[in-house]
Image (cartoon, grey):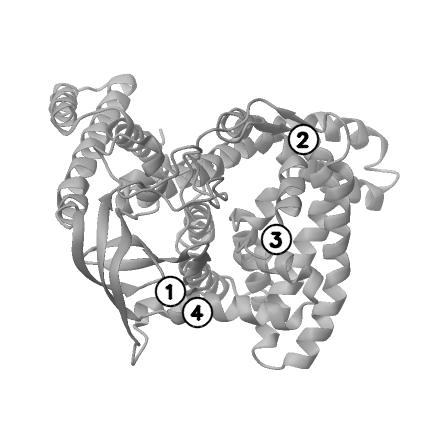
Amino acid sequence: MRRLAIFSFSFAAAAAGYVWLLSPAAALVLAAVSVVGFLVCLCASSDALHRVRIAALGAALGLLWSWGYERLQIAPLRELCGEDRAVTAQVCDSAVDTDYGCRVTVRVGRGRMMLYLDCKAGELSLGDTVSVTAEIVDVSRGSGDQNNLYYQSQDISLLGFQRGKVEITKAQKLPVSLLPARLAILTREKIGEIFPEDVAGFAKALLTGDRSGLSYAVRNELSITGISHVIAVSGMHVSLIVGVVMFLCRRRRKLAAVISIAVMFFFAAMQGFTPSVTRAAIMNTVLLMAPIFKRENDAPTSLSLALLVILLGNPWAIANVSLQLSFLAVTGIFVLSPHVYQIIIRPADQLLREKHPLLFRGYRSLAVIVAASFGATLTTAPLVAVYFGLVSLISPLTNLLAMPVLSLTFTVSFLATVLGFLWTLPAQILGWLLAWPIRYVLWLSGLLAKIPYGAIYTAVPTRWSGSLEPMECSRSTPPPKSVAGCGSCCRPWR
C-alpha cells in the first residue's frame, strides 16, 4: 500500500503549506485537526481509512516539524538582525567576486549567512574566521518578499552587508566538516589544469556544476536546446558514478553497494547536498540495498523517502526550484517514459528483434534516451515556463544526439580527474582527447539553438524565484541598505 509514500508526500504537502500559505498559529491549529483525524481513524479497518490515517499523521508531523524548525533554527538567527551588528563567522564555501567586492557563505551560530564584503574573493579561504560590523537582514518568513525563499531554501537564513572594517583570521587547521568542500575546490582547479582552456569551463560545469566558466551565450544555448540539466549536477551524474564503482567491483555486490553509497554521499557533500544530488544518492542507496535485504525496490517509495529526508533537514527546501524540477523530472520518467518507450520500440520490436539483434539493441538504447527525455520534459515544462519563461521543443532531439556522448564524456572525465591527482601528464592527454566530444556538444547546442521555434518563450521572467545560478543584476549602482535584491529586477545582488 506504499505507506511510506503516503506519509512522505503528506509531510511534504504540509511543509509546502507552512512555507507558502500558513501562519505559525494557523499551522498549529491545522496540525491539531490532523491529529484528531488520525485518532478518529485509528481503529479503522478499511484500506481507505487506513490511508487517510497515514496521511493525517504525515500532515500533522509535517506542520509540527516545520513550525519547530522555524522556532529552534531560524528564530534565534533573527535576533542577529539589525544595523551595525558585530559578527564573527566561519567561511564554509568558496567566495565569489562581485562588482563591489565578493560574496561568501559563512556559518554563524547554528545557521548560515550570505555575507557581502568589500574584499576580493581570493583573500578568503575555507575555515577562515571573519569579524565584521555589518547590517544583517532576515530572509525568512515575514520579510514580505517571496524572492527570499531562494536563500532559505538553501538553508541560508541571513544576508549580511559590510558596514565597517573586516578582519580575516586565517584557519590554522581545516575542520573535518569542510573537507568535502575543500576537495570540490581542488577538483575544479585540477579540471582547469587537465582540460584545454576552451572546454575547461564546460568540463568544470559537467563534473562539479560550477557554471562560472561558461559564457552567457553558452548557457543560453544549452537552455534553448534543453540540455542545461547536464551542467547542473543531478541524478545522471550520481548514477554514472555508481556505474563506474559497480564495474570496478565486478560481481562483488555487497562491496560495490557499500563503496557506491560512501562515494555517492561524499560526492553529495562536495556539491553541498543540493536537492537533486541528495535525491539521487538516497534513491540509489535504496536501489542498492534492496537486493541485499531481499526487498523489492519501489520507485514511488524511494522517491518519497528522498523527499522526506531532504525536508527533515530543511522544510524550506520545498521552495527550491532545483528540488521541484528534479522530483518532477523523475516522476515523469517513472510515469510517462515507459509508455513513450513502448510506442517507440513497438515497430522495431516486430522488424528488428529477430533479424537484426545488434541493430535492435542500438535502437533500444536510443529509444530509452528519447523516452526519458520526453517524460522529464513533459512533467517539468509547466514549471520551467513559469520560472524561466521558456519551453524547449527541440530538447528530445538534442538529448538524442548529445546524451550518449555526454554520458561517456562524464564517466571518462571523472576518471581523468581522479588520475590527475595522481599523475598529471596522462590526465592531460585524456583531457585533450575529451575536449573533442565536448566541442561537439557545444557546436551541436549552438547549431540547434538557431533553429526557428526550437523553443517557446512563454514570458520574460521578472523575478528570480529559482535555486539555480543567480543572474547578473541590471543595476549599475550598489543595492540600497536593507535590500537583499535589486529593486528593478528583483534578482539576488551579485
Q: Give whichever of 28, 192 is nearer the camera.
A: 192
Give the image location of residue 195, x and y in percent. 67, 68
Alpha-carbon distance for marks 2 and 3? 34 Å
Asked if residue 151 lies left or right of residue 330, the reply is: left
Residue at the (50%, 29%) spot, across then down: 461
**In the image, residue 257 above or below residue 63:** below
Give the image location of residue 321, x and y in percent. 43, 37
Tell which circle, 2 or 3, labels the residue nearer the N-terminal end.
3
Tell which circle, 2 or 1, labels the residue nearer the N-terminal end.
1
Mark 3 element type: loop
The picture quadrant where one finds residue 394 is top right
The residue that label 4 is drawn on is 122
Q: Nearer the viewer, mark 1 or mark 3?
A: 1
The residue that label 2 is drawn on is 341
Label pair 1/4, CB-CB below 8 angstroms: no
Mark 4 element type: helix
Q: Nearer the viewer, mark 2 or mark 3?
A: 3
Q: Give whichever of 37, 450 is nearer the camera.
A: 450
Q: Amino acid at mark 3?
A: Leu
Residue at the (64%, 70%) spot, across then down: 416
The label on residue 214 is 3
Farthest right residue? 355
